[in-house]
Image (cartoon, rainbow, N blue to C red):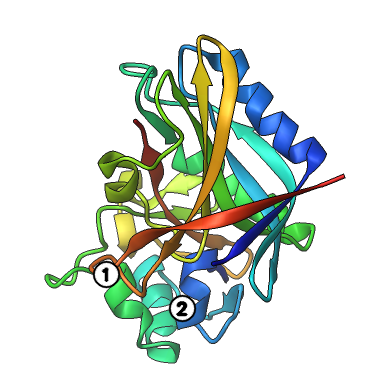
Amino acid sequence: MSVLLLSRIVYDAIRAHGEETYPHECCGALLGRAAADGWVVGSAIRAGNTRTDSAHNRYRIAPAELVRIQRDAMRHGFEIAGFYHSHPDHPARWSETDLAEAHWLGCSYVITEVAAGQARETNSFLLAGNNEEDKRFETETIHVQG
Amino acid sequence: MTIFIPTPLRSFAGGNKTMEVSAGTVAGALDELMSAYPELRRQLFNEQGKVRAFINLYLNDEDVRYLPLKEATEVSAKDTLSIIPSIAGGC
């Protein structure tokens, strides 16, 4: 099982983001470096949720915002390690929508359940596979440091 | 110009994060990238040879889909082409 290493600051930040946007989904990118058994995340970048038509159960990051995040990350020697979003009043498990819309193979997808405005469980899933046809989510371990 | 290769496609591009190409158009730049790394073709294009729907191409800060000449748009050495798979989902 792969491991996602998050600093306490990043872990708390993504959970706080979910509480702030409740009852809407929050979303953002995780920047870090690859390790032998997973990603070491150094920072979380908040992004806007463009799914204003259904923000309580959908999220989407504008590609133009992703372009800027990727460019800035690479300038600072980081990579996009994954993404995070919240599930308002819904378990921290990936949904069929999450899988269908996931295209960053090898990256981590972190989901936080926010129940009645309070962050509850946070889980991470690695998008495994070699292509769109055999992609799948694999549960990974989150280690919080600090 | 410089092509930025996103994290999930680097394993199909020799582990490289960027590639410098000398093509004169966006389409030419993509051809140069495919020639260097043929395994990328299946990741970026569908069976009809079109860019997959979830792949976004940005010339600097502009979505190539909305440029008047789209992939036939001319490029210069200082331009950047970002390949960005979409990110979305929900419960």
Pinpoint the chain carrying mark 2.
B
| Position of residue A110 measured from the top left corner of the image (x, y, whole percent) | 54, 43
- Answer left or right for B85 relative to B61: left
Asked if residue B54 can be seen in this view, the reply is yes
Residue at disc 1, secondary structure: loop
Seen as rendered, the residue at the extreme left is B48
Residue at disc 2, secondary structure: loop
- Answer left or right for B81 relative to A71: left
- Specify the quadrant of the image occupied by residue A121: top right
| Position of residue A117 measured from the top left corner of the image (x, y, whole percent) | 55, 11
Q: Are marks 1 and 2 on the same chain?
A: no
Label 1: how many Cα within 10 Å (few below 14, some 14–19, many 20+):
few
Q: Residue at x 31, y 16 (%)?
A: A53
Residue linked to disc 1:
A134
Q: Amino acid at mark 2?
A: Ala
Above or below, comparing residue A114 to residue A13 in the picture: above
| Position of residue B37 measured from the top left corner of the image (x, y, whole percent) | 42, 87
Label 2: how many Cα within 10 Å (few below 14, some 14–19, many 20+):
some
**Quadrant including the N terminus of chain A:** bottom right
Q: Amino acid at mark 1?
A: Asp
Above or below, comparing residue A6 to residue B88 in the picture: below
- Specify the quadrant of the image occupied by residue A35: bottom right
How far separated are the C-alphas under marks 1 and 2? 33 Å
Residue linked to disc 2:
B23
Closer to the eye: label 1 or 2: 1
> Between B31 and A107, which is closer to the camera in this rendering?
A107
Asked if residue B68 can be seen in this view, the reply is no
**Quadrant including the C terminus of chain A:** top right
> Between A46 and A144, which is closer to the camera in this rendering?
A144
Q: Which mark, residue A60?
A: none
